[in-house]
Amino acid sequence: MKFKILFLLTTFIMFSNRTYAQADTSRINKKRIFIVGGSLASATLGTYLYIQNAWWSDDQVPFHFDDGADMVYAKNVDKLGHLMGGLQAADIFTSSMLWAGMSEENALWYGAAFGSGLQLAIEIKDAYAPYWGFSKLDLAFGAAGSLFPVIQYYNNNFKDMYFKFSYYKRSDIYWKLERERGKEISEYAWQDDYPNQTYWLAIDMSKFIESSLIPEWLNLAVGFGLDDSQYLNENNTKKGGKNEWYIALDYDIPKILKKWDTPLAKNIKHWLNYIHFPAPTLRISPKVSFYPLFL
């Protein structure tokens, strides 16, 4: 989850770079490379200082790997957070390299390296934290997300697949458990609130169903989340909880707003397409339930 915080803070600094990103140009613009490097360094340093105080402020311990708790406390929903963080970090870096004049293929590979390297650095830092540990699975999911744009570039079968995220505060269980552990958590601290997060894989429906009745902007999405049945064991560690699976309709924002076609508009539509907006949804596990609009 620290990876998502890093992505969000970096986005504010790097966002303008993508606004003017273009396709391949004949050569690298050194001034733009300098701007990208400076922006990235500033964002990374600022985020590191924030995370150092928020997550790594305890005394360090010897390097160690995760002992298995990482597989339990969020029922692996956090792994999708790492995947999404890797994907978006790679996207930001790739877009910045395109803006600086790099070819699309090279920019994608540099983006993948940046996203994976960022995840590796976080896991190394976690390895010295008493409550965390180096998680090989977190690293694998973060790297997979970073490489996803590269896979899409080389394989057309993946071009119409989109990873998305949604959040709506349906339960207070996260804050309740944190208070029981003696921690004071801001009411806006959503980043570790997994019971209210859902991760989605959306697919263009027209690739599977040919019908004039289906709008070109309509997708089908599969969602993965966590219910609010977690509790604390005798060691103050989160246990329990059940994974939730959903099937929902989804919207392709660039296709819906295709007439809004300025450079800035394209940028806004691109980032909005990472959000799964409310839509008719069927929860298929752990209990079947239909939502006219799932938030």
Image (cartoon, rainbow, N blue to C red):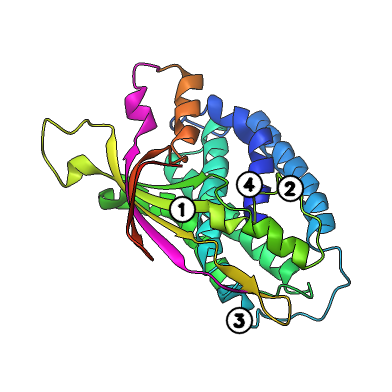
Q: Secondary structure at mark 1?
A: strand
Identify the mark nearer the N-term, 4 or 3.
Answer: 4
**Side (left or right) of 98 relative to 289:** right
Give the residue pinned by disc 3.
68
Q: Position of residue 55 (x, y in %)?
A: 78, 61
* Image position of 92 with respect to 135: above or below: above
Viewer-side residue, 24 vs 133:
133
Mark 1–mark 3 CB contact (< 8 Å): no
Residue for badge 1: 199
Q: Amino acid at mark 4?
A: Phe
* Mark 2 residue crowding within 10 angstroms, few (<14) / some (14–19) / many (20+): some
Instruction: Check disc 2 and report the residue beneath it.
Output: 44
Magenta stretch bounds: 239-260
What is the three-letter code of the residue carrying label 3?
A: Gly
Quadrant of res 136? bottom right
Q: Looking at the image, is 266 positioned above or below residue 87? A: above
Residue 292: percent from the left, percent from the top? 34, 40
Compute the Cα span from label 1 to label 2: 25 Å
Residues at discs 1 and 2 in contact (Cβ within 8 Å)? no
Q: Earlier in the sequence, mark 1 or mark 2?
A: 2
C-alpha distance separating marks 2 and 4: 9 Å
